Amino acid sequence: MSLFSGASGFPRAEQGASIVSRRCAPIIQGTAQVIFNVPYGNYAIAAVHDTNGDMKLNSNFLGIPKEGIGFSNNPRVRTKPPSFVESQFLVTNAKTRLQIQMQYF
């Protein structure tokens, strides 16, 4: 999971992106839990279920992901990834909790 503090580079975790933190977590009984310690503010999360462990999102020749993807606020992914604005959430207290539903194509 990559936690972004702004729209720059969202949702791709490329050099120069506004990534605050990145975390990996094992999936146990269909669930992965990640904890980010960040100051209050607006953020967005982009998550990848890296099924083959190569540390990147694999896609087919049309650019359609072969692995699961998910975003904070659970926007529906259709022809392109969601924007930072569609995925942003506000951290206002020490225990802000989100549930991200992964999408598989």
Image (cartoon, helix red, strand yellow):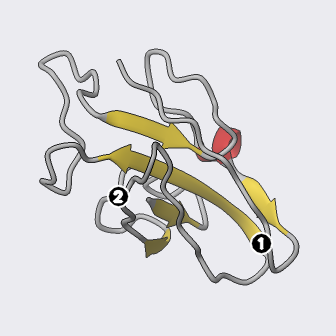
Q: Quadrant of the C terminus?
A: top left
Question: Are circles 1 and 2 on residues that touch, CB within 8 Å?
Answer: no
Which of 16/51 is in front? 51
Residue 13 marker: 2
Q: Amino acid at mark 1?
A: Gly
Q: Give x and y (percent) for residue 29.
A: 45, 46
- Say whether residue 25 is visible: yes
Q: Give x and y (percent) for residue 89.
A: 75, 55
Which image quadrant for residue 40?
bottom right
Q: Amino acid at mark 2?
A: Ala
**Count of marks overlaid on the render:** 2
Task: Specify whether 51 is left or right of 71.
Answer: left
Circle 1 residue: 41
Which image quadrant for residue 35?
bottom right
Residue at (66% x, 62% y) in the render? 43
- Give the structural element (helix, strand or loop) at label 2: loop
Furthest-front residue in view? 29
Task: Specify whether 62 is left or right of 35.
Answer: left
Give the CA distance from mark 1 to mark 2: 20 Å
Q: Give x and y (percent) for residue 74.
A: 64, 35
- Give the structural element (helix, strand or loop) at label 1: strand
